[in-house]
Amino acid sequence: MPPNEFTPTGRLKRRIVSDRDKWILLGMHLWWVLLVLQPIGLLAVALPIGLWAWKKNEDEFLDDQGRESVNFLLSVIIICFALAITIVGLLLIVPYLIVCVVSAIRAASASTTGEYFRYPMTFRML
């Protein structure tokens, strides 16, 4: 396993991320965004969970980022259902989903360069 270092901003960073791992990280962080753009159901949930389950024992960085991605995905589902209960919540779903998409893009960008990323507004269940 490659050693870790810190970026000038103080974030923990992995020195080397292979090209194959970059594609896996992109899939884990960005695949669920398709659920927002086009309702594809369980496939949007299953792929990030499947990628994380497949790679979690091989690499600690992929395990960490996969766990973070799955926690965020589950948090988005829970928060959207909670917001859908009230009229005010219904008005807040669209801005919340915009923040989620921006966060997913930031996570994909950071993790493919080797930075450990933490999503905002996330219940860490796993």
Image (cartoon, grey):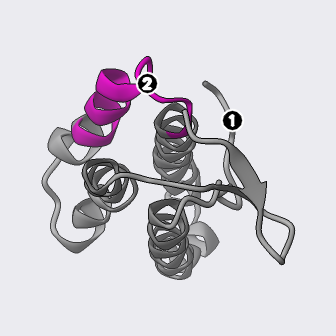
How packed mark 2 is, by other alpha carbons closer than 10 Å (few <14, some 14-19, many 20 or more), is some
Whether residue 53 is in magenta: the answer is yes
Indicate the quadrant where residue 23 lies. bottom left
Q: Residue at x 83, y 77 (%)?
A: 8
Indicate the quadrant where residue 22 lies. bottom left
Residue 77 position in % (x across, y down):
46, 47
Q: Residue at x 50, y 56 (%)?
A: 80
Residue 28 position in % (x across, y down):
35, 49
Side (left or right) of 24 relative to 105: left
Q: Which quadrant, please, contains the C terminus?
A: top right
Question: In the image, is residue 12 above or below residue 34?
Answer: above
Q: Residue at x 16, y 42 (%)?
A: 43
In the image, the segment drawn in magenta is: 47-61
Q: Amino acid at mark 2?
A: Lys
Q: Which quadrant, please, contains the N terminus?
A: top right
Say whether disc 1 or disc 2 marks the residue closer to the N-terminus.
2
Q: Residue at x 45, y 74 (%)?
A: 105
Side (left or right) of 11 relative to 57: right
Secondary element at tag 1: loop
Side (left or right) of 38 relative to 21: left
Residue 9 position in % (x across, y down):
84, 76
Question: In the image, is residue 96 above or below residue 79?
Answer: below
Residue indicated by mark 2? 56
Question: In the image, is residue 97 above or below residue 98?
Answer: above
The label shown at residue 62 is none
Q: Nearer the viewer, residue 79 or 87?
A: 79
Residue indicated by mark 1? 124
In front: mark 1 or mark 2?
A: 2
Q: Amino acid at mark 1?
A: Arg
How packed mark 1 is, by other alpha carbons closer than 10 Å (few <14, some 14-19, many 20 or more), is few
Query: Are dots 1 and 2 in contact, CB under 8 Å?
Result: no
Whether residue 14 is in magenta: the answer is no
